[in-house]
Structure formats: C-alpha cells, structure tokens
Amino acid sequence: MTIDATDRRIIAATQSGLPLVPQPYRAVALELGLTEADLCARLRAMQERGVVRRVAVAPNHYALGMVANGMSVWDVEDAAVADLGAKVGALDYVSHCYERPRALPDWPYNLFAMVHGQSRHEVEEKRARIAALLGVACRGNDILYSTRILKKTGLRLRQKEA
Amino acid sequence: MTLDATDRTILNHLQDGFPVSPDPFAEAAKEMGLTEDDLLARLTRMKEARIITRFGPFFDAEAMGGAFCLCAMAVPDAEFEQVLTKVNARPEVAHNYERTHRLNMWFVLATETTQEIEAVARSLERETGLRVLCFPKLREFFIGFRVAA
C-alpha cells in the first residue's frame, strides 16, 4: 500500500472533511491544482487499495445517544480467532475489532472488540451476545470501561511529509 | 438541534458511503428522494450542531505511513498522576485512556517506524519503573459498525 506525493497532498487536503458544496471534489482539485477527474480517480484507487476505508458521514455517537462503550477482550483459541473475529467485527455495535498478542500471565486475551450502546447495561447485554457467538472457543473474557480521557490527539498526516 | 426523520435517513444512508463522482450530493439526494439543496442544507446544519463529527474520506492511518501500537500499564493509584505526566509528555502518545482494570492506563503510540515503538516503550519503562505491555495489531477485522440514527 504505497501512496505518492500527490496522494499525500489529497489526504492532507481532505482529512478534516470534504467541503459541503455541490461539487466538493472539484473544489478540492482546484485547490491542489489537479483536475477533478484525476482527484476522483486517485481517491477511487486509494479506496481499492484500502488507503481510503470509505467516504462517508461519521455521526457523533454521543449526540445520537450511544454514550456507553467498553473495550471487550476475549481469550479465543488461536485456530478459531480468524473466523470468529470476522463475525464479531461484522456486528453493528462493534466499532473496532482486532487480534492482538496475549501478554501472559498478565493478559490472556487475544481478541479486542469495542462495544457501543445507549447504556452500560446495554453494553453488557451485547457482551453476553458476543460470548454466545464465540461459544466454547472462548476461554474467558473481560470488559474495560474508560473512566477518563487522559490525552486525545488526532492521528493526522504529518504536514512536513505532505 | 432536534433531528427529524429526514435527518435520520441521511445519517443512516451516508454512513454506508458517499459517491466519488462530479455531483455526489445530487446523486445521493436522488437515492433518498431529496433535493441536492435540501441535503446540503441539512448536512451543513448537522455538522455545525456537531451531530456529524466528520464527513469525507476516512484514511487508514497505517497506510499513510508510520506505526501504531496499543500499550497498557498497571499504574499504582499513588503514582498515577506522576506517571501520567511522564507518559503524556511524549509526543508519540496519541490517545490515552484510564480504564477499569489492573492495567489501568491504555494508550496508543504513533511513530514513524515499528522499531521506534519498541524504543519509546522501553524508554517509558526506564523512566517510570513500570512495565509497558505492547499489543500490536496482528489482524484487523472488517467493521460493520453503524450508529442507528
């Protein structure tokens, strides 16, 4: 997945969002000295390579009542984690789903899934549904709620490389 | 602001994707039975009211270059603020959350290379006298997440 200098300029120009004008790609292309067709072709190519995950609206979970979330963690048999991880990731209430290494003996969990809900009670219900989905391949689980944001900076493209 | 049924339709519909084409708003509006003007006005309103966090392309941070790693520490209560100051002072620490577990500090390291992740983690261990557990992504699963509006 490589991106060239022009792709980086496109990322820098659009990472905070598209302008809300009838022809947003034309507006961005003009700003970058590209043609609209070239910009759109590059965005589509980046989408195919997975550099662009999607072009979409991200609603504010909190404003829509999804105020509770927990990092659920699961100790899943290694042989089953690929299949089961895919099933957990596809759930509409899971926003991130990764296989990560265990850190034994402190940490036996190898599947991480961020679960969202309207309340902690709802998050716990969803956790129970994931437990049922994982079945006997899962030997244990836990859920970690965040009690405080200690630091939050966006992961943004460094301007010096743009 | 309060959302009406049309706003909710827009939020639900555009979470799934937005066209990459010359007149994307006209195209998306047509799919929802709206006019382009109405769609743009509603999106502008919802963005201003922060109902919409972001609208546009979402990039894979790793594909843009750089390395990322989730890390965790078990920080004793008495040392928490002191350790926090040391951890947050690092520009490589992108997010940091306090969580309900013995491993109570969870942060993401963002560096140029994978080797630097290891170096920053070890240096934080020397500075704090606590272990820094690293949980790099081994596999990422497709995300079906939707917020029902």
Image: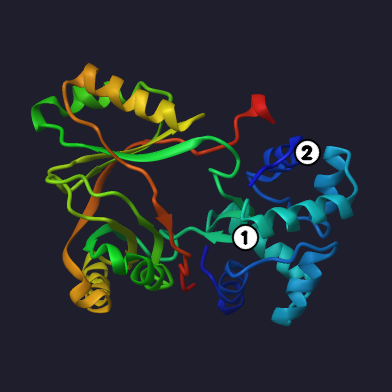
Q: Name the residue under label 1.
A: A54
Residue in front for this viewpoint, A43 or A55: A43
Residue in front for this viewpoint, B135 or B28: B135
Q: Are marks 1 and 2 in contact (CB under 8 Å)?
A: no
Q: Do labels 1 and 2 share a chain?
A: yes
Residue under the image location 81 percent in, 70 percent down: B26
Q: Mark 1 lies on which chain?
A: A
The kind of residue on which mark 2 rests is: Thr
User: For the residues carrying marks 1 and 2, which lies nearer the camera in this image?
Assistant: 2
Label 1: how many residues lie within 10 Å, few (<14), some (14-19) or many (20+)? many
Residue under the image location 48 percent in, 36 percent down: B67
The kind of residue on which mark 1 rests is: Arg
Query: For residue A6, which numbered disc appears in the image?
Result: 2
Residue under the image location 56 percent in, 37 percent down: A156
Q: Mark 2 lies on which chain?
A: A
Residue in front for this viewpoint, B104 or B116: B116
Where disc 1 sits, the SS reads: strand
Where disc 2 sits, the SS reads: helix
View extreme (bottom): residue: B33
Query: Where does the image place residue B4, in percent across and percent down from the top left?
Result: 56, 75
Compared across the picture, whether A147 is left or right of B76 comes to: right
Question: Label 1, label 2: how many angstroms apart (C-alpha)?
Answer: 19 Å
**Residue A87 position (above or below residue B115):** below
Label 2: how many residues lie within 10 Å, few (<14), some (14-19) or many (20+)? some
